[in-house]
Image (cartoon, rainbow, N blue to C red):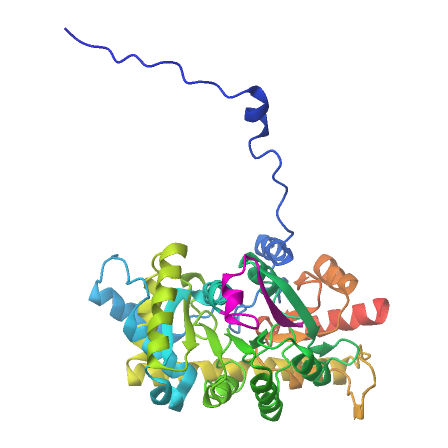
Amino acid sequence: MSSVCVTSPRPQAPDAFRALTFQSVAKGPHDPMFDLKKAADGNTSPFKVDLGAGVYRNEAGAYHEFPAVKEAKRRLDELDLGHDYNPTTGIASFTKAAASVMFGGLTSTVSGKLVSVQTVAGTGANRIGAVFLNKHWPTTNAAALKAPQPNATKVFIGVPTWGNYEPLFRHADFANIETYRHLDQDSGELDFDFVVAALKTATERSIFVFQACCHNPTGRDFTRNQWTQIADLMSTGRHFAFFDAAYQGLGESLDADAWAVRCFAERGIDMLVCQSFSKNMGLYSERVGVLHVLCKTAQIAENVFDQIRSLVRWEFSSAPAYGSRLADIILNDPVLCNQWTGEVKAARERIKHVRQSLYDCLTQKYKTPNLRKVTSGNKVVRPWMHLLEEKGLFSYTGLSAEMTKTLVRNWQIYLPENGRINVSGLNDGNVDRVAEAFDSVVRTQG
């Protein structure tokens, strides 16, 4: 005799509740870079020039695979490691080697006091770093740690900057986010006086977000003398340095681009570093990053490591393996690492070459009018000279939003409305046309 399982009818929610499920959810914030990339990717014209997304392009305007990465892929394929999980804190040999890239000769000095954990690229390092500080960085006294969220600590961000910093810190429950002027928009010069003023007037134990090199979007980095002054003021104010190092090697060199981080480390300033291998290894989609936290003692480092391990477990459990295995192979083989260093240098030199080419076209062939003030303080601003003074992938052109729209619509040159361009999207075949287009919009809309 068979039995039949009889269940009672499921109670139905009132119509009002069923109708309102997620009905009150508004659209998310507009992401102009997402829209720009979608538009650029959808254009198959041979005349298209993509100067938008921050990825290193080769001479053909396409994705550039570093030969060292290609060789690492071959070796990894032979190893046939499978698809098991990485440890929660990442591949130890990789994070140790990544620390050496960032801290150089200081690595042995900070050993035992440095926490290095693998993350989901640089953005993931920023996220974990912000959440960790929200939980463990007090504002003025230990009692602040017991205060209800959101954290009252002030976070200072120089503007213009990468658009993710402010929402990222707000998402980590920081309520007091302040900005200061990193760039004089009129002259295009770094506005160091505003930086100093922010450091001097900030509430004690504030958090300052710094880009270690190749500033996005301005390309305007602090000089070593300026970094030293910043370090002095950070020490005086007992502030925390939150370094983002997304472009190491694409400015001056791997070592020179880490100078600020090492300067702060030598002085014992409270700090963390968000390190990415997306750009300098071309591993964008593989999400290869490391979060480094420098602590005062080995015991503190042990506790911090355990807390960050917990955060990683709760956030994403285990970082992606493929790209970090490639980076691990490269960084731990002296010959292959030396090859990679040379390839990063070649990319850096190509960036400088196309900067010079664009500058020459604008100033010599087209004699394009200056978009900046003629003088900045006591300095005479030469037309388009910023192209040669900026470092890294980006140039902050000074083009207006209306000019950029015209460039997209009429010239098929894709760039965001803030006028920032990725100069690696230029090459010998398109730089003249880009200069002609810039000249056209400056003369007609300037």
**Residue drawn 48% across the image and 63% down it:** 135
On the image, the x and y values in percent for residue 6 come to: 29, 12
Asked if residue 176 can be seen in this view, the reply is yes
Residues 4 and 70: in front is: 4
Asked if residue 316 can be seen in this view, the reply is no
On the image, the x and y values in percent for residue 421 come to: 65, 70
On the image, the x and y values in percent for residue 414 come to: 65, 62
Instruction: Give the magenta-colored segment's residue range.
Output: 137-159
- Quadrant holding the N terminus: top left
Q: Which residue reaches farthest front?
A: 143
**Residue drawn 29% across the image and 69% down it:** 91
Residues 293 and 398: in front is: 293
On the image, the x and y values in percent for residue 239 come to: 56, 79
The question of residue 152 being in magenta is answered with yes
Residues 259 and 17: in front is: 17
| Residue 78 left/right relative to 199 | left
- Quadrant holding the C terminus: bottom right
Q: Is residue 185 above or below residue 321?
A: below
Q: Is residue 120 above or below residue 141?
A: above
Residues 264 and 353: in front is: 264
**Residue drawn 63% across the image and 57% down it:** 36
Q: Is residue 20 above or below residue 42?
A: above
The question of residue 445 being in magenta is answered with no
Total labels drawn: 0
Q: Which residue reaches farthest top?
A: 1
**Residue drawn 54% across the image and 25% down it:** 18
